[in-house]
Image: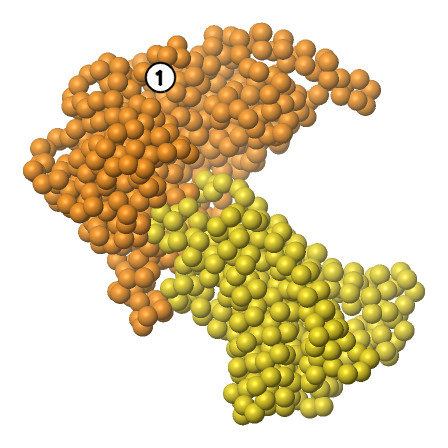
Chain colours: A orange, B yellow
């Protein structure tokens, strides 16, 4: 039975048509995927259903009856709940207080704390969630906080749950736990509308999927009859390449080397980490996140000093050289979490492309002043070369899409022909087209005979791109594998910690 | 961030502040229109009035620029009052000593010595912040009181000029900044402050250290990643901030008072923070905001003299301007700083 049905829904923002006559049917008790690239209109559609936006045209039916949802209050009253991508818990309140917040059981004017707690406990029993209700919400890991958000929605009596890109903020393990949770909710008869741009999650979770592209519906189909290739093409609108030809290009020459590196806390201490990146090679670092990858990256770029051991670049010991010196010698870094570490959102595209090169002769005139004519030309050239979509070089980076922000990082890092590139989680949070683009860039760097060190928690990515793979576990190199080794072998090396816990 | 100026909202807020101020007058039984008229006349009505307005605007233009520069690097220098006082004091000392230096040189050096005093006084909290993590809000505020009582002690005891008033001797005439609109107290310090505003704008937008200071303030992690030292540029911005505050103090002594008088500053350093925020943390905005505040001060005095409306009206308007313009800016700035960078959409 169709529980939620949308007909001809259209939403415009000025000139932009975010949703163009979209039809959607969600069956009772199914997990329905809503798939599309960033900006395809997924969030707008779900916001219309949840009453955050008023659609310009179109109708919404609930169990066959037309409904008018003017606000989230209406949606909640009708049994529709939404979990947002960014968590909205009050960090200093306890878990159970967060769950009842806004819908507290009362006695007279006062909150009936005893009954509230009991009701939340009963909800946990019914749904099979396990949580420490007495903890402050802010102390919990993000994945657990998200479970609290889901409980909040269930507490309000939601039968239809909308999850807006819930996995964007989660680690891979937390994603697995979320998938398990959602399967359980489905078994209890809940209907779930799951928004994502990640194919893997759609396949792991959904019964049927609706694909959107540029505000229009491309189609709805059962996941069992779909292939990743097919969905990706529907999303992007053209053929997408997941498989890259593997070319052996590695030369004898060692470009970059870590030799018996040890570090101190804070962070995971590195213990006797050694690795070599050859010219024309991509060396992958696989491993469950939090096993020393971030610390390793900091040692490579010079933000963290090793306690023991050496960092060698082109045969020279650069251990004592700060980040700037390494950049100028030809090292580049595509950092993980580019919002925080790669770009300055308040700066313009132009200024972001300049960042770190501002002291260099081409952009200076005189000792101290910047040559803005040169900088503008440089920026325009990079915008064109890398296909960065931006109104102008003076637009603040905040207004660019995630993929275009990442392109700015890449354009800057590759601007002066580095010999060695460190890429950390380079495609996290990017949509299919941007991911494909970035992978091509890294392979291009390799083809030019340069070295790449690729750190990624996405095992598929590491295996698709790397010539050799090292697996990190608890600050050590647990072993080296060929990318063709089967997943089971990777699992064994990566999973020590996971095995302990289970 | 491109330093941008959004004018209309501010003008609206300022207009609203005036309206609310008049409402307060009306409710308390004073004639709102004639009071406002007197205030405007006192601020612009005559040559002298204009001179007064500009004189009052001068020190707060210096201090607002000082606050702005540090703020751009992510430093919350609320100890500008202290750096301003130390600058005033060192400039006075320099002006009193070294008699015999010829005119422009003596004045220029005295002004610079004021800047130097302010810079050194800002260096302490800068080092404490960068190397020991002592929060600058605490240290600079404390040091402001140290400066206040230290200078007060000197002019009350060891350096007190003969007479009843706690003040130093007059500085040598060769160290005075010339008056430019006699008989008002307006001195060369005002055009210097104006020029400085443009200099600060140019520095932040067009120079390597200015770019680095803005980068460090806007995203320290990304800056560090790109080899821009957060420590180095925060210290630089802090010290430059102190320098500007110190020059402002020196300008007040050499231009207006001619000597260090105990308690001569009614809190120019503190006002600078508010002026800077009303000016949207933009150097040119600071010019407008300091003129507005100067006008309220100068006009307010005339208004009190001519009508019987208490000076509080102009203080109420000042407070309302701060509330309506500056507070939202500050809150917005602090929020974007604390908040993790958000997902942005095209």
Q: Position of residue B310 (x, y in %)?
A: 86, 69
Residue B23 appears in the rendering: yes
The residue furthest front is: B158
Image height check: is B120 above or below B129?
A: below
Q: Residue visible at 31% across and 50% down?
A: A322
Image height check: is A339 above or below A379?
A: above
Which quadrant, please, contains the C terminus of chain B?
top left
Q: Is residue B33 left or right of residue A24?
A: right
Residue nearest the viewer, comparing B217 with A85: B217
Q: Position of residue A91 (x, y in %)?
A: 59, 30
The residue furthest left is: A252
Q: Residue visible at 60% across and 21% down?
A: A135
Q: Residue visible at 16% across and 28% down?
A: A468
Residue nearest the viewer, comparing B225 with A380: B225
Q: Position of residue A455 (x, y in %)?
A: 28, 33
Residue nearest the viewer, comparing B164 with B37: B164
Q: Is residue A429 left or right of residue A313?
A: right
Q: Residue visible at 61% across and 63% down?
A: B80
Residue A156 appears in the rendering: no
Q: Is residue A497 left or right of residue A108?
A: left
Which residue is tagged 1?
A497
């Amino acid at each position: 039975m169709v529980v939620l049905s949308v007909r001809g829904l259209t939403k415009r923002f000025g000139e932009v048509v975010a949703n163009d006559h979209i039809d959607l049917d969600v069956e009772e008790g199914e997990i329905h995927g809503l798939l599309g690239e960033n900006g395809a209109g997924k969030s707008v559609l779900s916001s219309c259903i949840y009453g955050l936006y008023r659609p310009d045209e179109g109708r919404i039916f609930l169990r066959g009856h037309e409904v008018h949802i003017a606000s989230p209050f209406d949606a909640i009253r009708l049994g529709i709940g939404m979990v947002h991508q960014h968590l909205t818990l009050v960090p200093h309140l306890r878990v159970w207080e967060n769950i009842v917040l806004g819908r507290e059981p009362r006695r007279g004017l006062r909150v009936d704390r005893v009954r509230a707690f009991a009701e939340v406990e009963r909800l946990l029993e019914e749904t099979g969630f396990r949580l420490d209700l007495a903890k402050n919400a802010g102390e919990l890991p993000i994945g657990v906080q998200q479970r609290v958000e889901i409980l909040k929605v269930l507490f309000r009596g939601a039968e239809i749950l909308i999850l807006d890109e819930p996995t964007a903020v989660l680690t891979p393990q937390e994603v697995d736990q979320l998938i398990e949770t959602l399967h359980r909710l489905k078994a209890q008869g809940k209907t779930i509308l799951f928004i994502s741009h990640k194919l893997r999650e759609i396949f792991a979770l959904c019964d049927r999927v609706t694909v959107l592209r540029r505000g229009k519906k491309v189609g709805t189909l059962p996941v069992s009859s779909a292939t990743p290739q097919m969905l990706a093409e529907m999303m992007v609108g053209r053929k997408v390449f997941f498989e890259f030809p593997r070319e052996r290009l590695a030369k004898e020459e060692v470009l970059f080397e870590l030799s018996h590196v040890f570090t101190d806390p804070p962070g995971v201490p590195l213990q006797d980490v050694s690795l070599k990146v050859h010219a024309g090679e991509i060396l992958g670092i696989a491993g469950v996140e939090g096993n020393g990858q971030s610390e390793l990256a900091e040692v490579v770029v010079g933000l963290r000093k090793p306690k023991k051991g050496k960092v060698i670049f082109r045969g020279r010991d650069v251990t004592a050289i700060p980040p700037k010196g390494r950049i100028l010698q030809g090292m580049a870094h595509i950092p993980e979490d580019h919002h925080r570490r790669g770009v300055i959102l308040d700066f313009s595209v132009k200024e972001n492309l300049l960042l770190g090169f501002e002291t260099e002769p081409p952009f200076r005139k005189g000792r101290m002043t910047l040559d803005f004519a040169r900088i503008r030309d440089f920026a325009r050239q990079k915008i064109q070369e890398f296909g960065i979509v931006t109104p102008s070089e003076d637009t603040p980076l905040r207004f660019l899409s995630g993929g275009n922000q990442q392109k700015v990082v890449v354009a800057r890092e590759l601007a002066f022909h580095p010999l060695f590139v460190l890429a950390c989680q380079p495609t996290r949070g990017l949509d299919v087209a941007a991911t494909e683009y970035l992978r091509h860039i890294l392979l291009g760097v390799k083809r030019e005979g340069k070295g790449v060190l690729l750190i990624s928690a996405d095992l598929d990515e590491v295996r698709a791109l790397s010539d050799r793979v090292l697996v990190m576990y608890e600050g050590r190199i647990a072993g080296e594998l060929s990318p063709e080794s089967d997943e089971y072998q990777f699992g064994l090396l990566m999973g020590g910690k996971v095995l302990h816990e289970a | 961030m491109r330093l941008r100026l959004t004018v209309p909202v501010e003008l609206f807020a300022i207009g609203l502040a005036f309206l609310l101020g008049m409402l307060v007058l009306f409710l308390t039984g004073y004639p709102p229109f004639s009071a406002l008229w007197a205030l405007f006349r006192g601020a612009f009505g005559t040559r002298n009035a204009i001179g007064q307005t500009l004189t009052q605007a001068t020190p707060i233009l210096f201090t607002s620029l000082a606050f702005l520069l540090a703020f751009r690097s992510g430093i919350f220098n609320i100890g500008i009052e202290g750096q301003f006082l130390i600058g005033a004091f060192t400039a006075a000392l320099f002006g009193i000593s070294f008699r015999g230096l010829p005119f422009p040189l003596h004045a220029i050096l005295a002004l610079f010595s004021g800047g130097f005093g302010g810079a050194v006084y800002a260096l302490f909290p800068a080092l404490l912040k960068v190397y020991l993590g002592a929060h600058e809000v605490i240290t600079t505020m404390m040091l402001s009181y140290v400066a206040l009582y230290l200078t007060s002690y000197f002019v009350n005891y060891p350096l007190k000029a003969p007479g009843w008033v706690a003040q130093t001797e007059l500085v040598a005439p060769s160290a005075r900044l010339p008056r430019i609109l006699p008989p008002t107290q307006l001195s060369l310090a005002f055009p210097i402050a104006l020029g400085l505003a443009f200099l600060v704008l140019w520095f932040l937008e067009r120079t390597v250290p200015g770019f680095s200071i803005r980068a460090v303030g806007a995203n320290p992690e990304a800056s560090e990643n790109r080899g821009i030292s957060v420590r180095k540029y925060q210290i630089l911005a802090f010290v430059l901030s102190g320098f500007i505050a110190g020059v402002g103090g020196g300008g007040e002594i050499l231009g207006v008072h001619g000597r260090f008088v105990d308690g001569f500053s009614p809190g120019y350093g503190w006002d600078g923070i508010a002026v800077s925020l009303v000016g949207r943390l933009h150097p040119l905005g600071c010019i407008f905001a300091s003129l507005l505040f100067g006008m309220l001060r100068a006009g307010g005095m005339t208004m009190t003299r001519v009508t019987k409306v208490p000076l509080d009206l102009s203080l109420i308007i000042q407070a309302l301007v701060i509330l309506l313009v500056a507070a939202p800016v500050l809150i917005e700035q602090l929020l974007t700083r604390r908040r993790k960078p958000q997902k942005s959409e095209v």
